[in-house]
Image: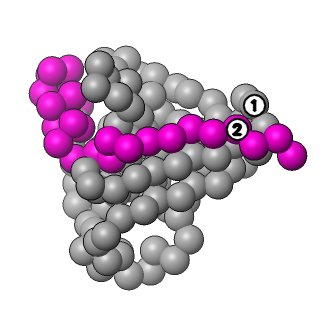
């Protein structure tokens, strides 16, 4: 699995959002995104990305089947796919700001979608590259 997150922001401008739901806490997830950025998730073989849904079943949690890492979370919307990447799966994240707590489970499904559309990367590409 290869993750390419492109943004004009410097690493120090990001404060990862640590979701307080049990799934994200158990995976140590803290998400970063840029509504002006681009995210490419490249699988080395078909089926290398496992999807899991919970709660409102609105978002897709993306896990690498090879190593088990929670890569990120995606939302399929009529205007496209939006996503946030788990900062822990990126290289060179030592300059990230301190994580902030986020509580999406307190929001209605509509409020979650509205928040995600405002914060997440709207330019998301999933690619499979055979080994």
Residue sitting nearer the eye, 35 or 95: 35
Q: Position of residue 29 (x, y in %)?
A: 43, 51
Is 117 covered by the magenta stretch?
yes
Sequence-wise, which precedes: disc 2 or disc 1? Answer: 1
Is 65 covered by the magenta stretch?
no
- Residue occupying the point 75% across, 43% down: 129
- Residue occupying the point 44% across, 42% down: 124
Residue sitting nearer the eye, 20 or 83: 83
- Residue occupying the point 64% across, 54% down: 2
Residue 12 horizontal side relative to residue 3, left or right: left
Q: Which mark is residue 23?
A: none
Q: Which residues are magenta?
A: 105-131
Q: Position of residue 126 (x, y in %)?
A: 56, 38
Residue 20 horizontal side relative to residue 49, left or right: left
Labelled pair 2, 1 in contact (Cβ < 8 Å): yes
The residue that label 1 is drawn on is: 46
Give the crowd class for mark 2: few <14, some 14-19, many >=20 residues within 10 Å. Answer: some
The residue that label 2 is drawn on is: 128
Q: Position of residue 101 (x, y in %)?
A: 23, 54
- Residue occupying the point 31% across, 70% down: 8
Question: How much space separates mark 2 and mark 1, taking CA atoms?
Answer: 6 Å
Splitting the image into 4 quarters, where does residue 51 fall? top right
Foreground: disc 2 or disc 1: 2
Is residue 117 visible in the rendered structure shown here?
A: yes
SS assignment at label 1: loop
Residue at the limit of the structure toward the right, as seen here: 131
Is residue 75 visible in the rendered structure shown here?
A: no
């Amino acid at each position: 699995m290869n993750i390419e997150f492109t943004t004009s922001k410097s690493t120090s401008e990001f404060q990862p959002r640590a979701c307080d739901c049990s799934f994200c806490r158990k995976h140590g997830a803290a998400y970063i995104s840029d509504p002006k950025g681009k995210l490419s998730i490249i699988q080395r073989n078909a089926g290398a990305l496992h999807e899991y849904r919970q709660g409102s079943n609105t978002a897709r949690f993306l896990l690498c089947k090879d190593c088990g890492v929670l890569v990120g979370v995606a939302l399929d919307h009529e205007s496209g796919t939006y996503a946030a990447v788990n900062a822990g799966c990126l290289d060179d994240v030592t300059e990230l700001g301190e994580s902030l707590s986020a509580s999406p489970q307190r929001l209605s499904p509509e409020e979650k979608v509205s928040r995600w559309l405002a914060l997440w990367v709207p330019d998301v590409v999933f690619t499979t590259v055979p080994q």
